[in-house]
Amino acid sequence: MLLSTLRNQSPCILCGLLSPLLTPFANAEIHPLNDAALAGVTGQGGVTVELETKLSIDQFSWTDEGILAVNGLRLSGKNDSVLDNLKLTIDIAGQDEVLEHGFSEIARRANAGLLDTSNPDVANALANYSVAGEFGKQFNKGDLVIHLGAVDTGDPTSLNDYLGAVDFELSVDSITSRGSGGSATLFSNVLLQGNLGPTDLVIRNGGSAMRTLANGNSVSGSELQLDTHFEITNGRLNWDAADVILLFNFAAVGIEGLQIHNRRGADTLGHFGMANATAKLSRGTSAGSGKNGLSIHDVEFRADIDMPVFKVGGTSIGTVQFTDFAITDTTMMVYGH
């Protein structure tokens, strides 16, 4: 109504009212940004995604001359609850930018006096994740950095709250193989419950550069890097067919009360009692065969494994334990034939 009234009066009245608002813009100058200025324009906070979900797959299979099938897969929180309290932070790094990685949150809390640095793991985190006054890992320009942690880690002075913030449950009804000669069940009644620690996926921006591994394989400098910590607090499975894993060569094995952690032995430092797995994946060329394929290299797995109920033929034969179970110096080249 007021604007309609003003329109019917002298345009100068409108000019007088709007002039104080428009003057700053009228006097402003627009300058194009040069390359140097554009290089300094970066996203300051990246993207944070809070996630809760449940995943179920009735069956997925790989068909070649026969069929390998995973049946009744489910990923959820413990006791079939929602998998929640997950937080993904996604950043494209600038040159030498320090971003959250691994146990950097522990280092931040230790620096603030919230955690006792007489704890060897805490002291190790503070030493390894302190970079130029920040906490995390330093990356190169263009690296895509994805860090998985928890939305709510509970009491900031409690390591137990932090380490148990994200619980999960993975179950598989069976893993089967089918062919013209019939079918066989490899594993069945698989259940793994546990906690997920800090997990990082980094896509390193190495451009078109290549590098040579110790075994002579040539791999791309642009690679996917995985680093995860986790623990299995309760697990079970039936091992129905032999020759599936080379570690053992017999069937009719049942495992109950399975635990995978890193609380014993000589390599616990820096892992806060959790098992650790790392690997790098990229395009590669085999030095032996000359074949191009997917290179999986710098693979490492460290854990202690407890199997308090180990059955053969349905009868328990006692308890089986592995201390300082380590897979290291492992490289694979995967290609079709």
Image (spheres, rainbow, N blue to C red):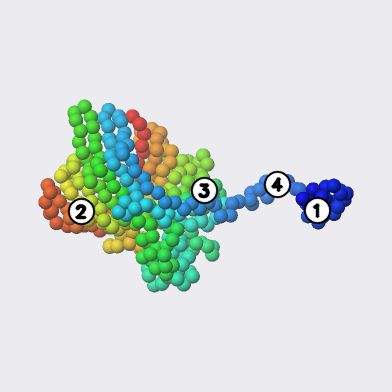
Residue appearing at x 42%, y 54% in the figure: 86
Q: Quadrant of residue 155?
A: bottom left
User: Which structural element holds mark 4?
Assistant: loop
Q: Is residue 71 above or below residue 231?
A: above
Can residue 87 be seen here? The reply is yes
Q: Which residue is mark 1?
A: 18
Position in image of residue 21 (x %, y %): 78, 55
Please tell me whether mark 1 sits on a helix, a strand or a loop. Answer: helix
Residues at marks 2 and 1, CA–CA distance in whole angstroms: 77 Å
> Which tag is nearer the camera, tag 3 or tag 1?
1
The local crowd at label 1, few if under 14, some if 14 to 19, many if 20 or more residues have their Cα within 10 Å, is few
Helix, strand or loop at label 2? It is strand
Q: Which element carries disc 3, helix, strand or loop?
A: loop
N-terminal-most mark, 3 or 2: 3
Any mark on residue 143, and which?
3
Quadrant of the image for the C terminus?
A: top left
Q: In whole angstroms, how far apart are the C-alphas of marks 2 and 4? A: 64 Å
Amino acid type, mark 2: Glu
Residue type for callout 4 = Asn
Residue behind mark 2: 256
